[in-house]
Amino acid sequence: MQQQKKILVVDDQYGIRILLYEVLGKEGYSTFQAANGKQALEIVQKESPHLVILDMKIPGMDGIEILKHIKTIDKDIKVIMMTAYGELDMIKEATELGALTHFTKPFDIDELRHAVNQQLVC
């Protein structure tokens, strides 16, 4: 039997975490949530998620910093970035650091779900 794929959602907005938690849970993924970088990195170390959906703007430690730490812990973890702004320089940097793609908020939940499924069907 195939192991259930794990996804970590990192966003300081509770509503977005809950939305993604519910949608991805219905897809059959084991989903974890973190509201900040410290929580996110603890979950990455403990659970080794297959994919992280990571917001760019998080108080304390921004998405780029978190991404760098995730890739230090495990370079094979896939990362999809979310951004609320047209932060093209940050998006470019995130891509150079290994992020697969990004979504601009408000995003289309079906598009995001499809992107996640594409990354994890292997």
Image (cartoon, rainbow, N blue to C red):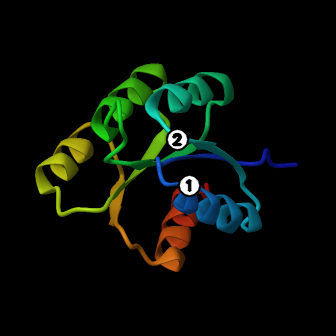
Residue 101, position in %: x, y?
Answer: 34, 57
Do the CB atoms of the residues marked 1 and 2 lie less than 8 Å apart?
Answer: yes
Comparing 72 with 107, the one in front is 107
Image point 88% across, 49% down: which residue? 1
Give residue 74's mark: none
Regarding residue 75, the answer to whether it shows in the image is no
51 horizontally vs 56: left or right:
right
Q: Amino acid at mark 1?
A: Tyr
Give residue 35's mark: 2
| Marks 1 and 2, the one that precedes in the sequence | 1
Comparing 19 with 70, the one in front is 19
Comparing 65 with 16, the one in front is 16
Image point 43% across, 46% down: which residue? 79
Residue 111 higher or lower than 34, as above or below: below
Residue 87, position in %: x, y?
Answer: 17, 56
Give residue 14's mark: 1
- Quadrant placement of the C terminus: bottom right
Mark 1 element type: helix
Residue 63 higher or lower than 14, as above or below: above
Which of the 4 image quarters holds residue 106?
bottom left
User: What distance separates the C-alpha of mark 1 from that of mark 2?
Assistant: 8 Å
**Residue located farthest toward the left when viewing the structure as drawn:** 89
**Residue located farthest toward the right when viewing the structure as drawn:** 1
Q: Amino acid at mark 2?
A: Ala
Residue 80 higher or lower than 76, as above or below: below
Residue 106 higher or lower than 34, as above or below: below
Local crowd size for mark 2, using a 10 Å CA cut-off: few (<14), some (14–19), many (≥20): some
Regarding residue 61, the answer to whether it shows in the image is yes
Which of the 4 image quarters holds residue 26?
bottom right
Local crowd size for mark 1, using a 10 Å CA cut-off: few (<14), some (14–19), many (≥20): few
